[in-house]
Each structure stands twice: as structure tokens, then as C-alpha cells.
Amino acid sequence: MDVTRSGPTLSAASSGTATRSASPLPAENDTPPKASNRSKQGGRLGDDGVVNEVEKQPSEGRGRTPGTRDHGQQQRKRLSFSPDRRPWPERSTVYQFRPFRGMITDVRKRLPFYLSDWTEAFRPRNWERTMGATIRIYFLNLFPALAYTIDMNLRTGGSYGVNETLLASVLAALVFSVLSVQPLTIVGVTGLINLFNYTTYDILERQPDAPNFLQFQAWALIWSAITHWIIAVFNISDYTRFITDMTSETFGLYVGVIYIQKGVELLVYEFDASDQAGWFSVVVAILFALSVYLLERTATLSFGPFWLRKCVTDYAFAAGIVFYTGFVHIPGHIKETGIDFLQVTRAFHPSTDRSWVIRFWDLPVKWIFVALPFGCLVTLLFYFDNNVSSVMAQSRGFPVKRPAGFHWDFFLLGCVTFVAGILGLPAPNGLVPQAPVHTEALCAVKMVPEDTKLTEGGFYDEEEEEDGAIEKRWEEKAPPKMKVVRIRLVEQRISHFAMGLLTLGTMTGPLLVTLSLMSRAMFAGIFIVVGWGSVQGNGIVHKTLFLLRDHHLTPRDHALLQVRPKTIWLFVGIQWLFFTAIVAISETIAGIGFPVIITLLIPFRYYWVPRWFSLQELSVLDAPTADSAATLVSLGGPLQPEHGHSDFFHKHRDDEEASLSEPMHQDDGTLRKRTTPSASSKDEVMTRL
């Protein structure tokens, strides 16, 4: 397992099937004192966040293979966060859209953990992970945002500059680290809002009576904030539960490709000065991308002690920025190439000659209402982007144990959007791939034998391993071949909060001067290496390469061998089709509507895909991006099988397996049509997911 860059998603082939139950919830050190004390008397965490029941399992002794999951070895806490014991399809419309239900539930369930969210980072075994994650995410959040600022500044007539981007990042980081339910999700300035901003600017510039751009943007974001609040109040974020790998992989690939495209565009701009500056910029960008990429893969190598390799991985991105900032200033021919550098302004002042507060009240009434559909499109984009990034930050590959809060966090995003509009800032929202990288950086890792059994999420549960089991195996025979796995996650708020403070400090004069020494070529390299991380780890790419590889060299136990190649081609083809459509529309003036296509992925996966693929095929090709009970608590409880509907699930799974075991062709060689369970009800479709 490559722990240097997890990528935005995990492929279904590598993370198990989609039919998985809720994972165990807070370990003893993650449970608030009140819950922990009551759990000793017997208890399960109810709607009020208090444990009131313990599910006991009979002990079966310790005679087991090391690394296997023996649930009878000890009493396990089974914490149920479900706000409603009824299955999803049986819940009434009144319950689903009851005002403030989701927001109140989110806050109530996370509140018992709030104090420990701050103190957990300072525990002796956690401070190293917290510090490494803080430095890594500070650089990974700030510098791609600054790179997009270069593009935004060029394409919006200088409306957005470095200080606007820095202030937007500070606003999002401080608000979400202190007030959000889930502090793992990183919120900041993204490439998608950059695309939206300059497309809006192009549309307005074509109008004969074009309004002031920032005043129009202010009203668009005010409308967007209002619709954010409506969505949060009426629990519409519940439908995030339908996001699977088909959706998140397609979106992750799009984001990665856009990053790389923007990097290439920045390099093209460098040729405007001279060919010498242009080609030297290409060299700097490639050197930066390659060196950072190789350094971040150090943890997977076998040279040097593991702690040193992990340290190099954590600080590779920051070290690359420091080195290449100075590299372009080496006296001689390098310094004389005449490349461009980042443009900065006065500390804590807007980039243009204006006050921080936009005079939005001066916008003509006509344009106030024209801004309404633009605001709705921003909301649609943020609904998808922010929720997907939050899901990916809590995906099944991470041992997340503390409750999520999609409704409250989306309400909070609306508040940040409102303030961003008033101040003339680019609106921040959830970041891909920064959000999952933040979670990955907070994961403690361990080297274990390659044949060690892992959980369904692909991480190692130390509580399930006998004491000293790995060491005993070393004593019995020669040291086995090892792999690096995640063992636990440091869930805290300090890294996110510290990142915000560091970004605020970056707005000071001395650090702005330091930023002005950074070449635009290095920012192009940042685009390329961050984008490649999303592309390389993407499930669409992995499945496509699987179809192209020599089948004689494919391991016989490969998960995708359970599915016919034609079926894989169809599944991947759908993803490539949506990806191509999103990229194509983004390159035109109609790109203002690209959030619509992105969001259509969710209902498409829910309603149509189950009609074309069998249950077993979907269990191999797709899976919920996040399926832990801690994440699903904010989205209506366990995903599958729903309470009381496990018999339905197992019945149809057995039918599908029996169907797949039959020959796929008739005796005369004609293709036999496979029958699949009907998807006549939402319950059936939900079970398929």
C-alpha cells in the first residue's frame, strides 16, 4: 500500500465489496468520559450521544490465526448512531424534511467529543502526526490556491489577487476548524470556483451594460448562501449517502486533469516574455513535479529506517517549495532567464484600489435578480464538491470513528460563502485532493507482514491482533516481506486551526515578500504534481489499465476477474463518458453550467446503473465511498443492509451468485440475457448501492 498519496478515491477492486456493514465506532480513547463510564455498565450510544447498551459476544478463546478478525475474543462496543431505526425507504416525508433535524442531530452527536477534539492532538503518541499533517496541509492548501490565483487574476481583470485568496483561505480554515462538526475536511479556494469565476466574468463582459463584476459576484454568493441554508435546514444533504466510487472517481479524475491542464496553461503564459524564459519554466516545473513525486514515495522504499522515510514523505512538498524558490535565484544564467514571479500587494489590503466591503447595494435591481441563477449554480457546485470532498476525507480506507456532520457543515459553508461575497473574496469550499490527503497525513502507519489480514477498509486493526503476534511470527521463521498499513487516525482540530493561523501569518509583509520570490514556473509544477496524485490513484485509471494488461500476467486472485471484461468496459465507459462531458463543457462559455452535469452523476448512479449491472457485478466494480457508521450517522444511519432488510439483501445476493455461476451462452452460442432483481422500489435500489 502506498501511503505517500492516497489519491482522492479508493478503487472498489482494492477495497473490497460494496456489501459491508457498519464498522465499529469509537475506541476507548475516542469516547467521551460520559459515554465511556456508562458503557462499562452496558449501553449503546443513542440519539443523545449517550451509551445505553453493550452487545456482548461469547468468547471463543484465543486459538486463531494472527491477523484474523475474531469478534468473540472480547466484548466489543457496538455504538449505533442511527437517528431513526426505520429503514430509509420507510421514513416519512415529514421526517425527511423536518426543519433543522439534521443540523441538531449533527451537533448533538459531535458535542461530547468537542473538548477531546482539541486535546487529542497533544497526546504523546499523536503530536508527531499532528505536526506533520499541519505542515503538509498548509503547503498543499496554500500553494495550489495561489497557483489558481495567478490564473484568476489574469482572467478576471485583476479582480482577485493573492490577498483575496489568502483571506478566503484563512476565513474557511478558522471557521471550520472551530465550528464545524467534521474538522478533517479542508475548505479553501479550489480550481472549480476559479473556473466559475472567470466564466461568469466572460459572460458579463459580453453584455452591453455590464455591471460591476465584484458587486454581481457579491449578490450571486448572497443568493448562494441563502440556498445553502435552505438545503441544510431541510436535510437535503442526506442524499450524499448515495455517493459511490462511480461518482467520486469520476469527479476526482476531472479535478486531477484540470490541475494538470492549468499547470500547462501557466507554462504557456511564460513564453509571452521570451522563449528562454518559457523553456526554463518548463524545466523548473518538471524538476519540481518529479522531485516531489519521488520524495513522497520514499515511505514505500526499503532504504533507511522507516521513521526517516515517513518523515521525508511528510515534508517532501514543503521541502520542494523551499528549494525551488531559491533555485531560480542562483546567480548567473539561471537568474538572467527573466521568468515571471508571483505578484503581491500591500499586507492586509485588497489587490485593487477598493475597500474590503463590496458596495453590493449599488448594483441595479435587474442584475440582482440575474445573479440568482448564478448563485444557484454555485450552490449546486458546492453541494456536490463539498460533500464529495467530505465523504472522501472520511472514506472507508480511513479508520474514522467520530461522528460526521454534513448538514451543519453545509450550513456553515453557506455562512462562509455569504461573508466571502460581502468581502469580494473567491468563495471557498471543500478541497479535492487536499481533504483526503489531510486525513491520510493524520493516519499513524505500521509495517506488517504482507499476508496480514486487514479490515474491509484496508487498514490494520491493532485491537484485533493478539499481543506480540507479529513478533512471534518473526521468531518462528525468517522476517516476512512487509507492507505499510494505516492503523489509526488522529481525529482532532489543531492541524486545521494551525493551518489557518499560518495562512493568516502569510498575509504579513515579510511573508508576502517571500511569496513574491516564488516563480510562476514552480506553481505550474505544483499544479502538475498535485493533479497527477489524483490521476494516479484513481479507480477509473486502474480499471482501464486492468483491461489493457496481458491477462497471462494478471494475478489469479484479482478482484476484477470476478466480472466479465465487457461488463467492466461498460462500467468504465460510463465514467469516461461523464468525465469527457464535464471537461468538454468546462472549455466553453457554457462552462457556467458544468455543476449540473457533475451533480447528475448522483441520481444517474442511483436510478439507472442498477438496471444495467447485477448486484454481484456492482459489489466488485463499485462501493459506497464512505460506509462507516461514524460517517453515515449524519446521513440517516447505516447504509446497507438497512435495519430489518438484511434478508432481502442476502436473498438477492444468493440469486445473483447462482445466476452468475450458470453459463453465459446458450448451446447454440447466442448470448443469454441475464435477469436481475427489479429495482422497483427505493429500498431495492438502495440495497444495490
Image: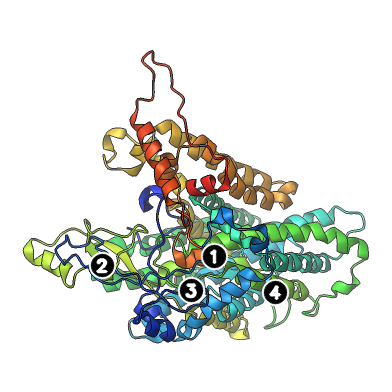
Residue at the extreme left of the image, as rendered: 476
**Pair 1/4: label in front:** 1
Q: Tell me if mark 2 has few (under 14), some (14-19) or many (20+) residues whose alpha carbon lies within 10 angstroms of its own.
A: some
Q: Residue at x 42, y 58 (%)?
A: 290
Amino acid type, mark 1:
Asp
Earlier residue among tags 1 and 2: 1
Residue at the spot of label 4:
415
When asked about the image quadrant of residue 581, the answer is top right
Residue at the spot of label 1:
84
Residue at the spot of label 3:
46
When asked about the image quadrant of residue 609, the answer is top right
Spatial CA span between label 1 and label 2: 30 Å
Label 3 residue SS: loop
Amino acid type, mark 4:
Cys
> Is there CB contact under 8 Å for labels 1 and 3?
no
Q: In this orientation, which residue lies closer to the viewer: 550 or 578?
A: 578
Residue at the spot of label 2:
464
Spatial CA span between label 1 and label 4: 28 Å
Image: 639 above or below 664: below
Label 1 residue SS: loop
